[in-house]
Amino acid sequence: MSRFSIGAAALLVMAALTSRESTHAQQTPAQTPSLRIEGTWVRKDTVGAGSFGGLGAGIPAAVLTAEAAAGRRGGGPGGPARGTPPPARPVKPGEPVIVVDRPCGGGGGGRGNGALLINPDSGGVHIVEHKDEVIFAGERGGVRHIYTDGRPHPAPGGWVPTGAGHSIGRYEGNVLVVETVGMTPGGVVGGGQRTAETKLTERFEVAPDGQSMTITYSWEDAKIFQKPHVYKYSFDRLPPGSYAFEDWCDASDPIEKYSVTPPIQK
């Protein structure tokens, strides 16, 4: 090989490496420290629902296809979710507020931590960002792995559905965009159902002050939803040094139903 050929080959290798590094750089966490999602967060009541079950009252109802709506009425695979959330209302001073209502008593079903942090409840969540993945860990168990290394979803038939599904993510500036498929059948907040083919897109976005975060959920499945079913959850950042505790969950233990009484404001 001539000296020129060696040089040309080296340039090609360098170009390939530069291209790969450039592509991977797009997947790295946000560069603005205060706007990174890494840290510990707790979901907040933004509508005065009085309980985290009642927060569902502020979420718009999903617009279902005729087939999915018929399934709900018939109580089949697309049947109605158990329980009706109470209407949102202001909490009176000194009135107890239920923050955890037997969290591990309802099974998977797509509710709360049963779906492995697809829709976090009142328990704290801890997020760790890495150049290849984001780890989403909950206080009462459950861990999601969100891969940001550019890998695709598994080929059809190459993935056994799970409660958390298979998640891949990318960064759009300071916003983490996550796409999840391959979930086990279950309910969806606001109505409707999910299947292994249902796609969920989440957008994790931190407010300019770095102290609050929203996750915008968008469910898509032409067999179930007439249009994407979209809603938001809001979170507060906990102080530095906070972390998610490991907590054994026993639905038969009365202490699993926690409540707090907000103090009278002066």
Image (cartoon, helix red, strand yellow):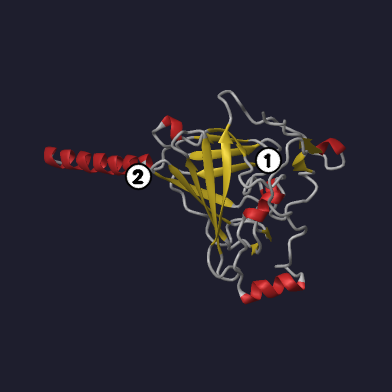
Q: Quadrant of residue 182?
A: bottom right
- Residue 66 location, x and y as percent? 63, 76
Residue 81 position, x and y percent, is 74, 61
Of all residues shown, which one is farthest toward the front? Answer: 266
> Residue shown at 53%/44% (left/top)?
214
Q: Which residue is mark 2?
A: 23
Towards the viewer: 175 or 257 = 257
In depth, the one of 40 and 134 nearer the eye is 40
Q: Amino acid at mark 2?
A: Thr
How far separated are the C-alphas under marks 1 and 2?
A: 36 Å
Q: Quadrant of residue 221?
A: bottom right
Q: Secondary structure at mark 1?
A: loop
Query: Would residue 203 be found to the left or right of residue 90 on screen?
Result: left
Neighbour tally class for label 2: few under 14, some 14-19, many 20 plus, Cα within 10 Å: few
**Circle 2 SS class:** helix
Position of 135 with respect to 253 (left or right) is left
Residue 52, percent from left and from top: 70, 45
Amino acid type of the residue tagged 1 in the rendering? Ser
User: Which sits in the foreground, 191 or 181?
Assistant: 191
Residue in the picture at 57% in, 26% down:
239
Q: In what quadrant of the picture does the N terminus appear?
A: top left
In the rendered view of the protein, which quadrant contains the C terminus? top right
Near mark 1 (Cα within 10 A), the count class, few <14, some 14-19 or many ≥20, is: many
| Residue holding disc 1 | 122
